[in-house]
Structure formats: C-alpha cells, structure tokens
Amino acid sequence: MDNKLLEIENLKTYFFTDSGRVPAVNGVDLFIREGETLGIVGESGCGKSVTSLSVMRLLAHTPGRVVDGSIRFAGMDLLSLPESKMREIRGNEIAMIFQEPMTSLNPVYKIGDQIGEAVRLHLKYDKKKARERVIQMLKLVGIPRAEEIVDEYPHQLSGGMRQRIMIAMAMSCEPKLLIADEPTTALDVTIQAQILDLMRKLKEERGTAIMLITHDLGVVAEMCDRVVVMYAGKVVEEADVFDIFENPKHPYTQGLLHSIPKLRRKTERLQSIPGNVPTPGNMPSGCKFAPRCSHAMDVCREQEPDLLQIASGHRCRCFLYQNDLAKEA
Amino acid sequence: MANNSVVVQPDGRVVPQDAEKARTPFSEFWRKFKKQRLAVVAGCFIILLFIISLIGPYITPYSAIEPDYDNILSPPTLKHLAGTDAYGRDIFSRIIEGTRISLFVGLTSVLVGAIGGTFLGLISGFYGKWVDSVIMRFCDVLFAFPGILLAIGIIAILGPGLENVIIAVAIFSIPIFARIVRSSTLSLKATMYVEAARSIGASPRRIIFKHIFPGTLSSIIVYFTMRIGTSILTAASLSFLGLGAQPPSPEWGAMLSSGRDFLNTAPHVTFFPGFAIFLTVLAFNLLGDGLRDALDPKMKDE
Amino acid sequence: MFTYLMRRLLGVVPILLIVSIFVFLFVHLIPGDPARLVAGPDASQQDVELVREQLGLDKPLAVQYIAFVGKLLQGDLGTSMKTNRPVFDEIAARFMPTFWLTVWSMAWAIIFGLLIGVISATKRNKWQDYAGMFGAVSGISLPSFWLGLMLIQLFSVKLGLFPTGGNDTWKGYVLPSLTLGAGVAAVIARFARSSLMDILKEDYIRTGRAKGLKENIVVWKHALKNAMIPVITMTGLQFGFLLGGSIVVETVFSWPGLGRLLIDSVSFRDYPVIQAELLLFALEFILINLIVDILYAVMNPQIRYE
C-alpha cells in the first residue's frame, strides 16, 4: 500500500530579515502515507516547524516565504491553491496542534466557542449541532465534565487539559492529516504519556495520518511508523522506525541515538554531539554536519552529499555510504 | 560594511572592530535611529528651531513689536511672507521671535518636571513601602485632575503669566515622570547587578545614582522629548485662553488668540502661528517616536 | 468579580478624600486673605469680617474642612461671586452641553481611532500603515484651538455648512466634536495599532488561522477582543484629556459648557466656581476610570471569574 497522502519535494523556505536571507528549510523531501505516523526529528532550529508551517501555508504573517519546491496533498498542489481554497483545507483536512497549549487557546472565548468555530465553519453545523459535536469531541479526548467545560474559559484548565482541547479542536472535523508540532514538550512527563496515548488511540480509530514533530526520540519510538531526521534545513536520513533505532546510518542520527540516556547502562557517561547546529548565516560549505562529525572526510568539507537510497525505504545523506554505492556500481 | 580592522575607543584602547560585534551602545542606537528617516528630519528641524531661537532677533526682517499702521492685516505677500496682523506687524518676524518663547517654555517646564519626577520615581521605586505609597498617592491625586485642568487650577492660584505657565506645566509633568521612572526602577532593582552592588555594601545613594539612574535614562529621554511637544501645546493653549503670555508678546498661542477676531477677513493671522505650533510639536513627537523605537522598542505609546 | 469590584470601589475612597482636601485647600493656597477674596476687593473691612464669620474662615482648618465636606454632601457648593447664584445651579446649567460634547467626541474618536489602528496593524509597513500613523502623530500634535478655528474658517465662513458656535442644533456639535476628538482618535489609533500588533504575534492567533478562519475573522474577532482590553483602559484615561480639551474647544466655539465657565471664572476670580469645577472634573475623571475598570473586568474572563 503506497498511498502517499502528503508529498513534499525540494521544499525551500527562506526568511527575509534585515540581515539578509536566511534559508530555514533548504530542500526538504519527504512524504506521508495515509494513516501513517511520520516522525520528524532534529535539534531546535533545524527547520522542522518551518516545514510544517509551510505545509499549512501559515507563513504569510512571518518574514518567511516558500521560494521553491512543491507540496502535494491528496492530489492537490497546496502551494498553488488560492488562499480561499487553502482555508477550506486548514483545520478541515489538515489540522495542527502546537507546542504551547497554555498560549494556543484564545483567553477571551469559551472552550466550546473555539472548537465549535471550526465545526461550524467546515462541517456547516448549526449552533446547536456544533455544541453537541464539541461535547462529543471533548468526551472523546477524555475531558471529564465535558458539558460544563464547553462553557469554561481556557485559563480555568491545566496545560494537559488544554492540549486535549487542542487535540479535540484539531480532530473535530476529522482531518486526513494531523500535524503535531512538539505536542508534549511543554507538559509534565505523566501528562505527556496520556497525550501520546490519546493521539495513538485517535489515529487507530480514525486512520488519521500524523506528522509528529519532536526532538524526543522516546516519543518517536513510541508513536511513529517512519522517521525523517532533519539537520540544518535538510533531511539527512529517512527510514522506518526500526531501522532508525537498530541500524542508524547517518553520523548525526547515530549521535542523536547515543545521546539518549539508557537505563541499563548506568555507569556510562551521556554522550552528546560536539558543537552546535550552525546558524543559518554561518553555514559551512559541503556537508552541513561535517564540522561536528567524527567521520568527516575531505570530500565532506567540499561537496554536499545527496539524499540517496541505501536500502529499501532507507535514505541517507552521507558520503560514507555513497562511496559504498560507488564501489558496488 | 567595509570597516577598518581596528577602532580606537574614546578611552584610548584599541580594539579590533568586527562589523557585527563590538558595537558601543551609542553606535547601536545611532544605527537604529538613522533608519527612521522621519525622526532624523524632525531632529534636524528641531536643531534649526534652536538656531532660529538663538539668532532670531538678528534675522527678522521687521520688528516683532513695533506697530506699522500703514500695513494693517495685509495678506501674505513677498514683502510680508506670512502677512501682517491688526497692528501691521510682520507675522513672519513675530513667529521667529516666538520660537524662542515656545522652546524656552517647553524645555524649562519639562526639565523641571523631569528632574522632580525622576527624583520622586527613583525614591519611590527604590525604597518602596510607605515612601512609595505616599508618592504614588500624590501622583494619583495629580492625575485625578485631567490634563490642562491642573495647569488652569495652578494658574488660578498664581495668576496669569508666562512664568506661572511654566510652573504649572512643570508640576503636571512631575507625576508622569515619577511613574515611568518608578516602574523602570522597580525592574532594575530586581536585576542581578543591583543585587551584586548591594551585597558588596554600596550605599543606597550610590546604588540609585550609579546603577539604577543610568538604566532609567533611556525612557526618561524618550518621554522628555515627547513631553516637550505636549508642553509647548499646553503652554500655547493657556496663552490662547488668555492665561499665559499676554499681548503684545509674540508667543504663538497669544498671537493666534488675537487673530480670532479677524478670522473672516484675515485668516492668515491665525493660520501661521498655529501652523508653527503644529510643526514644532510634530517635530518633537516624531523625534520622540524615533528615539523610542531606537532606544527601547518595548516601550508602549502612552 | 464582586470582590474585584469592591476592591476597586474602596480604592477610590482615599483618592476622593485627598482630592477633596486639595480642592478645599485651593482657596487657602491663593496668596492673600480668603475672606477678602470672597468679599471682593472693594468690600469694607467690616464686610470682610462678616464674610469670615459666615464662611467659618475664623475656625481651625480641620473644622472648616469637615464643614466643607458636609455642605458638599448636601450639594451646597457655595455662591458664585459673579452672579450671586448658587454655584450648584450655575454648574448644573452648564453640565449637559459639555457632557454631550465629550460623548460625541469620544464616540467618533473611538470609531476612527480603532479603524485606523486596526488597518495600520494589519497592513504593517505598507502605505496604509505609514499614512495612518503619520496622520495619528499629526493628530496628537495639532493645537485644538487652531484646528477648531481652521475648521470654522473652512466649513462655517467659506462653505457655510455649520454654525461657528453654539449648540442650538445638531449641526453645532459637528465641528466642536471633530476638533475635540481629533487628538483622542490619534492616541487611540496609535495604541490600538501597537497592542493589536502584539496580539497578532500570539499563539492563539496562529491557532485561529490553522483552523481555517478568514483573516478578517482572526483580526476582528480573535485579535481585537484581546487587544481591546488594554485599549479600553487607555481610552478611559483619554477621557481626562477630553475633559481638559473641552475647556479650550468650548472657548473656540462659544460653547455654553463647563469649560468656558471655568475660564470665565478664572478671569473673574470667581473662586467658589473654580473650586466646584475642579472638584467636578476630578470626580468625573475618577468615575470614568472606575467604569473603565469595570469594563476591563467584564472583557477579561480571567478577572471576571476570580
């Protein structure tokens, strides 16, 4: 079953600031199949969030602009859709939840009004029917006292509850794709687990595809079918979740995996990747990871490797493997 | 961006100059301020006004006070650029003379208000407790008399006249500065370096003037500039109401007031002094806006 | 909500108290003998003493103050020295014209101020923004007496559309309220722009857009209601500016209101009237601020439910 719901090709999103043009996303290729959960992993600043905002076309009010590439969703070219058509997709076919549940809800409107707004807009429900739908959604995401909460204001709820509200809002119009941008980062660990459970349950029940953006590999292991690892605005590795954990190829992915604390090996020191993600103004030539890479070769500093298939469903942007391929050929 | 590789600091040190780093606060300010073309134009205009107010009497084509009964209420001509008033005096010359009055009134009243308000604000914010309560209650009461009303009340006590206008405008600037300075004092008091200074045993006076006052300076400068505009406007209003400068003084508000009776036949007598007030106040407000954006973008409109 | 209201109401009491002391002391701050001031410069020494006794000016200040407040609570504000009528009647006759003038000025100032502010914020750094903000900074720089006279010159003298003064018909309200509201509209526009721009950066605005809402709904429904909270507070403060400004504008337009009465009284040294006016203006201002605080609480659920 190779039914691609979302397909991003060569996406380039630049930010235009006083100090010049900043390539936040610089040639991203990825796809999501129907009903699949794709994890997008990387350190902060690698372009994960900008990729998701590009898909939603929510960059209009930022200095960012998509300068190249294509985004296809369910047979439509999202980048060439008129804004009115795009509005019909947002919140309806593609919904999004954000990192900050505390600030993502409008403080001056009731919970019910905020969720109901999407329902009335996209499903054309009347006020009464929308309210029923909202209560039904609140129950679905495990909110107690749903009939009362509809008439409450966000500030009366905890962070975990607000994230459930955000999920209820996102799921209320039965989207085909849910983009979750670090949905659990701001929450307590126990709440994190509950929210992830909820998302998994909804996905299984409704067959929603999820684009899960995170820097937490534990979340990836628990939730995802496939993983895309991003570094400095590019995809550096892509594989299914087992391959990523069992057989990581890119030195950056290996570094990320090594930096997860492991319970069984208590004595070992935590490893970290030396150095930082290069700032967009100071991109190294050649492979963007080369300055931090323990395997870096001369060629890495001169040329940038391509993202090439190294096994079925496993792609990697690294010269270490391209030489292998070259030898085989 | 083509910079020399070294720069000599005012204190004589030679430091390598990186285009991105090693900016002094002033050059950083200047870089941001320069971008605001309107504010720069306004600043130049204000400098011009100051020059005019200094050399005014030497460049006026006609006397600002002497009547000329042959030339009453003449509309603007090449001879009299802004026309003449009911006594035949050249309005253009009178406006030039009046520049000095307006700038003097605006500057001195705000200066007095700023000094008083800053002092109160520093003390209030630094010592807190009952000192703070007393000063802030005092400000609340002054604020309870809206705008120009307080000035009118003060003039009702002191009597009309330009000196009393200055006093009145100064007093009603005090609570504004006190509040702003107090709030930045409060946030500065909480910052680390004041804590550090206190822990090495610096005296309160030293902490206030060495550590807190410089931090409040940028907001003081911004409000100072903006208040000058407001003060010139208030002073002109009071003169217009007959409570400030009295004729035949070429104060702009008073000139305008005397032109009212000829609005039908000679509107230029009211137009030009009012336009001078408008331009001057506009320049100070634009400069204030520019300074605010360059010094402290977080600061809000009042 | 109730506790919040009570707290605000109680907070007004000390200010009222101090304001009343200030206003009471006002007559005593004027250089010279208050009894002589009230009796007038031509009165004989005997009359002065009589006035002193009548007004209780020979008693200690504290006793005088209590008597002053007592009379105040009964609506006795003294007698005008100019007309010899009770100050209360003088002021009552002048109250409504000023009230309506400020209301109309405020109404159009809010409408235009908000409109310009919202347009400038949504068209940030485009020509609409520059035009709106230059208009606004000009608005706060305009001397209202000059603007008023120029409007008279254009619309009354040249075009004959509106009267030059007076409040006999609705037409009389147009030019004065335009003049008085211009500065306030400018301040509201600037403030609305900056607070709306802050709000538009909030996460929940992005949520609204991600929901598929039209940009107009995001701005006018989601952003504006939040932006209105600080704007209302600020607008309340501008009422003070209006009250003050009305003094000048009433003089320009020969408006039979409180402002012109105050100026007449200052030139006539009619101290009881000045005193009463100061008190009334301060009272109004305090009252408006109280209303603003209540509105603020109504708009902001976080306070309403405390």
Image (cartoon, coloured by chain):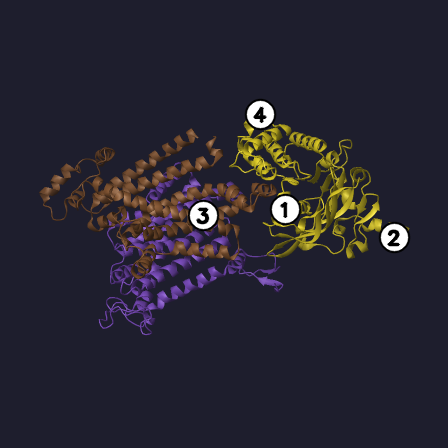
Q: Which one is nearer the viewer's eye here, A265 or A329?
A: A329
Tell me the CA gap for discs 3 and 1.
29 Å
Mark 2 sits on what residue?
Answer: A326
Instruction: Give me the residue at 42% from left, 47% from top.
Output: C111
Task: Look at the numbered discs 3 and 2 and tell me whether their residues touch, using CB distance below 8 Å.
Answer: no
Crowdedness of circle 4 by 10 Å Cα count: few (<14), some, many (20+)?
few
The amino acid type found where label 4 is placed reads Arg
Mark 2 Cα-neighbour bin, 10 Å: few <14, some 14–19, many ≥20:
few
Q: Nearer the viewer, mark 1 or mark 2?
A: 1
Q: Nearer the viewer, mark 3 or mark 1?
A: 1
Quadrant of the image occupied by residue A262: top right
State the hue of chain B: purple
- Left or right: residue A198 versus residue B123 is right
Q: Between label 1 and label 4, give the one nearer the viewer.
A: 1
Whether labels 1 and 4 belong to a single chain: the reply is yes
Q: Are marks 1 and 2 on the same chain?
A: yes
Q: Position of residue C206 (x, y in %)?
A: 59, 43
Q: Earlier in the sequence, mark 1 or mark 4?
A: 1
Task: Give how far apart the Cα atoms at labels 1 and 2 are.
Answer: 44 Å
Distance from disc 4 to disc 3, alpha carbons, whole Å, reads: 39 Å
**In this figure, which residue is indicated by the disc labeled 3?**
C114
The chain painted brown is: C
Name the residue beneath numbered marker 1. Answer: A86
Label 4's element? loop
* Sequence-earlier tag: 2 or 4: 4
- Amino acid carrying label 2: it is Ala
Disc marking residue A145: 4
On residue A42, the disc is: none
Looking at the rendered structure, the secondary structure element under dot 3 is helix
Q: Amino acid at mark 1?
A: Met
